Amino acid sequence: MNHLANAGHWLRLFIPLCLLMTPLISHGDNPLVSHVYTADPAARVIDGRVYVVVTHDQDDQSDYSQLVDYYLFSSDDMVNWQDHGIIWNSRTDTSWANLAYAPDFIERNGRYYLYFPDGANAIGVAVADNPEGPYTDPIGGPLVDRNTPNGNVDWVFDPGVFIDDDGQAYLYFGGGGPGNARVIRLNNDMISTSGSAISIDAPNFFEALSMNKRNGTYYLTYSTDTAGGLAIDYMTSDNPTTGFVHRGTVLPNPWENNNNNNHQSAVEFEGQWYMFYHNRAVSNERGDSTYQRSINVDLLSFGGDGSMQPVNAGPGGVPQLKYVDAFAINQAETFDNENGIETAPASEGTLNLEMGPGDWVKITGVDFGPGATGLDARVAANIDSSLEILLDDINSQPIATLQVSNTGGWQNWQTQSVDFTEVTGVHDVYLRSTAGHNLNWYRFTGGSGNGSSSSDSSSSSQSSSSDGNNDSNVAGSIEITNDWGGGYCAALTVTNNTSAPVEWSLSIETEGSITNLWNGTWSQNGDLLNVSGAGWNNTLQPGQSDASIGFCADRTNPPPTSSSSSSQSSSASESSSTSSQNGDNLASNGGVESGLSNWSTTAGDLSRSTDQSRSGSASALISNRSDTWHGLTFSPSALSNGAEYDVSVWVKLAAGAADATLYLTAKREDDSDSSTYEEYSRVAEATGSASGWVELSGTYTQSGTPFEHFIIESDDGAVSYYADDFSVIGETQDGGNGGVIDHDFFVGNITTSGNVRSDFVQYWDQITPENEGKWGSVETSRDVYNWSGQDQAYQYAQQNGIPFKAHTLVWGSQYPSWIDSLSPAEQAEEIEEWIRDYCQRYPETAMIDVVNESTPGHAPAGYAERAFGSDWIIRVFELARQYCPDSILILNDYNVLSWNNAEFIEMARPAAEAGVVDALGLQAHGLESWSLSDLEANLNRVADLGLPIYISEYDIAETSDQAQLQIMQEQFPLFYNHPSVVGITLWGYVVDRTWVEGSGLIYDNGTPRPAMTWLMDYLGR
């Protein structure tokens, strides 16, 4: 049904008036889901998407005794949500639980942990390798119940899981009234607890404890009782278990919740915080009971003092973060709104829509770019049906109708097509059935298929799609990951759209002359790029996509007019970089050619306009200002204290505006004196006009608190204006290295969520698989290997000429569980077999973390000690030397530079003196608060062992850009310039895809954080 139809109708009347003033920014309606009832949301950011696990309210339930399973939904634009179906059922997936009350889940070390309450009596845990499952119960009983020390609360339910920056995990739980809130530590395995539960004093507590951390402060939210107004309140502390201070209400009892309590989940995504909750809006409209709930999401903001601001909950929803690419294959079960549809598993994978007469789905914000002229749809039916395509209003006339022919069965899939008159721009799309059929996916065809539009609603990269000319069964899409005007690098994804394996090849239009391509064989003829597999990825399975292929291109040179073959691999040095193009100009994307990265506002609406530009194709536009201080902001690379910069930007007033004065102001971070405004420095002023571009230029000397951004303001508080060609010329910060690598030294990184991003060699010259090479990932069943994940990273290293490091051979975590049941003799045989088989498969491995985390109290491999005795470390290294004679063999551990320096040295010395260890690996997590002198002293003590040192797992877990930058500038040169350190591997680089929160260095669309910009400048990359 069309939930909240009246609100939607009002929005349709209002939007055309908005179009007269500002580009369209789509919103999604609340509630988010109406085809099933959902409650108790638990949200996490995974691989550039927000995933929400929810309780499933049955359509006919009259109490909560039928809560037995969980649904999963996800979105990358916060408006259109993909239904992943039921991922857990307590009655079929466990041997002991009967109910599935409010859940929570989290990722750790490449595995996903789902915490499920069996009613109000116990909490279990299930584990999977993917957020979608399948999940299994590893302990076969409760993780927490009333027998847990200090766990005897009224209601043992509502788990809230949290992993702190230091790696310590916690489980919050409890309910039933004040005095029933608890938290308990989880062990590193995430399926066992440590010590007793700790009581938390939460005023008016009822249930739903949930923990977030922001800028070093812990935020504990919870649902209050009737005395607290059935609201979501919050407390803060500088400790995750104690010292909480009640701060107030963040979510009052929301709209259409029928005076019931609530359940919340807060998450940060793409720089914006969101609050998920549930209400009864859909069931109220349908006349169902109060036991049928629906999830919602609204924006969450914070005050300058760190306080959570009350959420303005309502049916309007949140802004769409990115448009839907019309030319991509779009899963039908991803939509914003619906009427009558149901979802079910499809034989080709994922889910399909079951559409009856009059059923429809709405997909919000579909970008048709310069034009689409047809639709392909993957359909199945045992009757003839039709699918109508409507734009912007369900009551409009269809632009086309696809006649769905009987395919011979509800899971007998065919791709059927229809043509229509060209459609351009961005529209809401409605797909409506007239009889009955199943729909698996759809894509629009025709035009140039680049998915672009005249105005960007976000800074995310747009992608292009077209069918391969060599094989109509294979689709290709290109997404630009880095664009510096004269050239770009991009990711190429190929997809098999058939139900059978194919050996693929693809011809796709590109811009510029290809300079290098990886993970594929290629040639170029004019604008046509011809690609096929690199050998290991020649074949695509049914429905499979391969996103490992990438390339760089030069726009300044015309493409070759005849086909010119090139090799599969290229060196990292061939990749271009922004820093080399900009020189001393610190204003990356000052010309607004790469979305809106580095542009923002102090208030008002920001958009990217292609109607006005001083040079290039676009400018930044601020509109809907209501005060003089509302202005555009621009954030350059880090500015050095004491340095002088020449700053310039060109501005133009919007059409029809009277002349007004415009100002360019430099803003530093606020100091501790709130009574002064010394953080602001006027750089330039000029009279702006709607008739032409005017330059604001001047000099600025940075001093005092760290630099924040430049502001473009006007004394007219209502005028709209454009800005373009921002430049900041001056000296860069290089941390003392001068931007030139002057010694043989790699700075590498790891795979991203099990894959190698196409931009990897733009930044890094060494690769380590994060989880794919761990014994527990490769040999989950005895003598059955799955090398696929590690094969990809190894092949990538070979093709790009960069060193490959294995991680790890023998470790007391993430090892095959079956080895514990073997005799010591059998364990010894299996360890040797594992090392032998690894070395035979990957003979050109440059470095190996042979033994990992063996310091007492860390995670020494007990099975190896049982197999080989007290000298097990030496014996494991001897085996590694026997089978991998040409690899550098490393003893790797954590907290060596902090708490466990002496313990590590004592553990490592016998193996070092035995001559079996080639180098030492020092993990470098959790060093954010350590002094440089302590780090240097501990590093020097390890160096006294006389072995080369690899900084093996370095990250900086700081959500504050400035804090991360400052730490990077202090710590990295220490490691880089130390005479014993011979290489550094950072542990992840993509925001929200790293092991610890806040440690990412670039956003998924390639936009760097300041620490990344500084690091690349320091390394001269």
Image (spheres, rainbow, N blue to C red):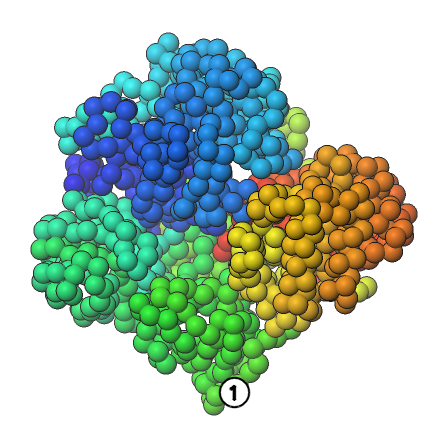
Q: Is residue 296 above or below residue 574?
A: above
- Judged left or right of residue 882, residue 192 is left
The residue where tag 1 is placed is 564
Towards the viewer: 798 or 284: 798
Q: Could you tell me which residue is drawn at 12 percent across and 55 percent down?
A: 436
Towards the viewer: 902 or 864: 864
Towards the viewer: 182 or 680: 182
Image location of residue 641, percent across then percent down: 74, 45
Check disc 1: other Cα within 10 Å, few if <14, some if 14-19, many if 20+.
Answer: few
Q: Is residue 463 above or below residue 93?
A: below
Mark 1 element type: strand
Towards the viewer: 425 or 92: 92
Quadrant holding the N terminus: top left
Image location of residue 312, percent across then percent down: 36, 29
Q: Is residue 231 above or below residue 948?
A: above
Q: How many marks?
A: 1
Quadrant holding the C terminus: bottom right
Q: Could you tell me which residue is drawn at 73 percent across and 44 percent down?
A: 865
- Judged left or right of residue 916, residue 29 is left
Splitting the image into 4 quarters, where does residue 899 fall?
A: top right
Q: Amino acid at mark 1?
A: Ser
Image location of residue 187, percent across then percent down: 60, 32
Q: Could you tell me which residue is drawn at 71 percent across and 37 percent down?
A: 858
- Judged left or right of residue 398, residue 668 is right
Image location of residue 208, percent across then percent down: 42, 23
Using the rendered image of the protein, determine whether residue 540 is visible from the camera's viewpoint. Answer: yes
Splitting the image into 4 quarters, where does residue 516 fall?
A: bottom right
Q: Could you tell me which residue is drawn at 77 percent across and 66 percent down?
A: 885
Using the rendered image of the protein, determine whether residue 719 is visible from the camera's viewpoint. Answer: no
Task: Residue lying at the far bottom in this picture: please name it.
Answer: 562
